Image: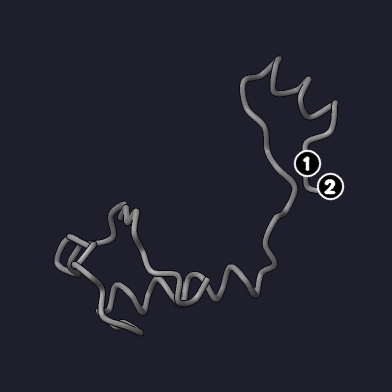
Amino acid sequence: MELLPTDEDVAFYQTHGYYKSKKIFTNEELDACVAGSERYYRGERDFALPREVSGWRPEHGNILRKNEALPHFAC
């Protein structure tokens, strides 16, 4: 319950159109997620995927990467 927005947070959102949440994940959890995504983009897999879900390759550079079916092996 402590992660839910307060009444003040809701009022701020209604006035300004955005809301900044409290910290949800620990630094360790975020580090594990980053490490997992880096493994994924290096081509490492913990199991065979039914189909390859990433069209990104290293030669594309440091761009936005969207993976809707990214396996949950680190996060």
Report the side of 32 relative to 47 (left or right): right
Query: Disc 1 on helix, strand or loop?
Result: loop
Few, some or many residues within 10 Å of mark 1 (<14, 14–19, 20+)? few
Q: Amino acid at mark 2?
A: Met
Q: Quadrant of residue 30?
A: bottom right
Identified at 66% across, 69% down, the residue is 27
Q: Nearer the viewer, residue 66 or 62?
A: 66
Q: Position of residue 69 (x, y in %)?
A: 34, 59
Residue at 69% over, 23% down? 13
- Estimate the spatial distance between the alpha carbons at disc 1 and disc 2, rounded to whole Å: 5 Å
Task: Determine the secondary structure under disc 2.
Answer: loop
> Dot 1 corresponds to which residue?
4
Could you tell me residue 24's position as x and y percent?
Answer: 70, 55
Q: Is residue 64 left or right of residue 13?
A: left
The vertical placement of 46 against 71, above or below, is below
Q: Is residue 20 left or right of residue 33?
A: right
Within-10-Å neighbours for mark 2: few <14, some 14–19, many 20+: few
| Residue 64 spot, x, y in % from top left | 31, 52
Query: Which residue was labeled with disc 2?
Result: 1
The location of residue 2, given as percent across then percent down, is: 85, 48
Determine the residue positioned at 68% across, 38% down: 20
Q: How is the image coloured?
A: one colour
Kind of residue at disc 1: Leu
Q: Is residue 12 left or right of residue 67?
A: right
Q: Residue furthest left?
A: 59
Task: Tell me which residue sits at (45%, 70%) in the image.
Answer: 72
Classify 62 as above or below 2. below
Q: Quadrant of residue 7?
A: top right
Q: Which label number is shown at residue 35? A: none
Quadrant of the image occupied by residue 18: top right
* Contact flag, marks 1 and 2 (Cβ < 8 Å): yes
